[in-house]
Image (cartoon, rainbow, N blue to C red):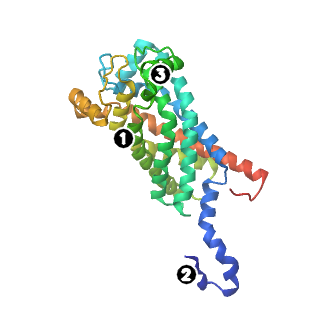
Amino acid sequence: MATDVSPKFQNPDLIPVQKPPEYHPETTSTAAHDGLHFWQFMIAGSFAGMVEHLAMFPIDTVKTQMQALKSCPIKSVGVNQALQSILKNDGVKGLYRGIGAMGLGAGPAHAVYFSVYEFCKKSFSFGNPNNSVAHAASGVFATVASDAVFTPMDMVKQRLQLSGSCYNGVWDCVRRVMREEGVGAFYASYRTTVLMNAPFTAVHFATYEAVKRGLMEISGEESVSDERLVVHATAGAAAGALAAALTTPLDVVKTQLQCQGVCGCDRFVSGSIRDVVGTILKKDGYSGLFRGWMPRMLFHAPAAAICWSTYEATKVLFQDLNDSKSSGNVT
């Protein structure tokens, strides 16, 4: 590209100008979101994940109880009825059962999630910050890595969220599952989780980057920090809502696998996705695959807005810190 354009410029400028055009796209992309060390991406992602999940945890509890097929679950799929049932049976504290497991898992998982995403995004984009395919592929790689970290604690969290859960906290659940079901129980839903989160993150990241780019073009490159915060939050909300809606059936399957055999939930012989889907269709029909879709969207839209705006704001803090220490130092 640079060799085709450079002859159009005056000859004295060919030598000094030729190298910057080759590196300019990467430098522009780096300045826009990089300029950070690998550990800084991990801290920013960890902090964003913790804020996101802890803030939206009550809605996640409603979704989990609505999705579990068992003899003791909430029969109605209405969000309001589900919330009232939880408050009646367990009080406000019932909305926060399992939050300790979420706290232990969300931080490390999101640290892996965002650091892998940023690394792959830089590697796959080839200097083009508008490469949607690179954004989607980076999201898939990020979720495969982060799900390996998060799935065990997610299983513990969901078992604790069930109404009438037989576990007395995070460590009691971990010990009993290890003793009664073995290590494999912690990863019973890993395959389903990856199959769900791969398209989820592909849609999520591609949508987020596209919406953010469009909003930034509308608001202008030199928009002030609070306007940029609104852009990140809006793009995140749109990405989270769309991705959540498209992947609800697999999320229902994941919940079934993680809660099987607990509090009257069905236990599946093979643990395959086909086995679970067949059971759901037999009991609930096709509508059963979309149980909890409303709280799932209500969770992911604001959660993604919180997560992305927190993540981007934390990155800006690190960028300012790096600039103050060494101006012109680009990783």
Q: Which residue is mark 3?
A: 178
Crowding at dot 3, Cα within 10 Å, few <14 / some 14-19 / many 20+, comes out as: some
Please give left or right for residue 231 compared with residue 189 in the image.
right
Quote the CA–CA distance across marks 1 and 2. 45 Å
Q: Which residue is mark 1?
A: 247
Specify the quadrant that holds the C terminus: bottom right
Judging depth in this view, the residue of 317 and 185 nearest the camera is 185
Dot 2, how many residues are within 10 Å of its Cα: few (below 14), some (14-19), or many (20+)?
few
SS at circle 3: helix
What's the residue type where badge 2 is placed? Asp
In terms of sequence position, does the residue under pointer 3 or pointer 2 come before the other?
Answer: 2
Going by the numbered disc 3, the residue's amino acid type is: Met
Above-or-below relation of 156 to 130: above
Q: Looking at the image, which residue is at 41% across and 25% down?
A: 62
Q: Which residue sits furthest bottom?
A: 11
Query: Residue 178's spot in the image, x, y percent?
Result: 47, 22
For mark 2, what is the residue? Answer: 4
Q: Is residue 31 above or below residue 184?
A: below
Name the image quarter holding the N terminus.
Answer: bottom right
**Residue at image location 54% in from the left, 53% down from the top:** 120
Q: CA distance from mark 3 to mark 2?
A: 63 Å
Identify the residue shown where x is 36% and y is 29%.
257
Q: CA distance from mark 1 to mark 3?
A: 30 Å
Residue 12 in picture, x, y percent from top left: 70, 85
Amino acid at pointer 1: Thr
Asked which secondary structure carries label 1, the reply is loop
* Residue 51: numbered disc: none
Q: Earlier in the sequence, mark 1 or mark 3?
A: 3
